[in-house]
Amino acid sequence: MNYQPRTMNYLDIDSRKKAFIFELDNVLYPEKDYLYQVYYLFASLLEYTELINARETTDLMVNTYVNEGKEFVFDRLKEKFGINEKFRANFKHLMITAKLPLKLLLYQNMLNLLQEIVVDRKKIFIVTNGNPEQQLNKIKQTEWHGLEQYLTVYFTEESTPKPEPDIIDLLIKDHNLQRRDLLMIENAEIDRLCAEASGIDYINFNVFIAL
């Protein structure tokens, strides 16, 4: 079963749900807020070491992300500015470990939802794909408004990435839950497939963001 409402808030959710599963990127916060700050930091590095205008490199990285995807960003920099391949390692390392100028901010309606879940004494899980060190770095630099103490995080790369259901099975076992107790808030086909394979309900985060 999956929910298909037009718009929702916490009170519209089945009150029998005991736990909620969220992805991190583009569900709780906009992933671009992290990436754009890393691009800014990398552009500053290039300006300092290679004397390449930081505004131009930042603009190229952002435009590449928007039009082609994040996996092409360094290649386009290399093509346009002749950046040495040795900087690819610097870029990858910075992408994982960057200390951001600004904290990451949750979508306001996701913040509201998390707060209501906590007030109702339900469980919150973040089940996230991707490099565990990078995802933890994002979590540490997010403004949680005190909610961090109520979060339980699972990094799927430490077992089997979504859409495989292994991590959901582990979560259910760890916390003595039933599948009917869980609701996944998703924003990607991978999460929908994972929820379906796990036999748990899911709903797209847009029905909250659209409020």
Image (tube, grey):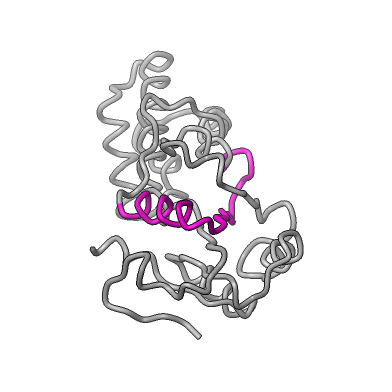
Verify whether residue 130 appears in magenta. Answer: yes
Q: Residue at x 60, y 78 (%)?
A: 180
Seen at 46% across and 65% down, the residue is 185
- Name of the residue lying farthest toward the bottom: 1
Question: Residue 81 placed where, x, y %?
Answer: 36, 31
Q: What range of the chain is rendered magenta?
A: 109-135
Relative to 168, residue 62 above or below: above
Most extreme residue toward the front, as rendered? 120
**Which x, y percent locates residue 12?**
35, 73
Q: Position of residue 110 (x, y in %)?
A: 37, 54
**Camera-side residue: 137 or 184?**
184
* Quadrant position of the C terminus in the picture: bottom left
- Asked if residue 62 is among those painted magenta in the image, a careful observer would answer no
Above or below: residue 73 compared with residue 67 = above
- Quadrant hosting residue 175: bottom right
Residue at 30%, 49% (x, y): give it. 108
Q: Position of residue 30 (x, y in %)?
A: 36, 49
User: For this rendering, which residue is in front, 129 or 47?
Assistant: 129
84 w.r.t. 162: above or below? above
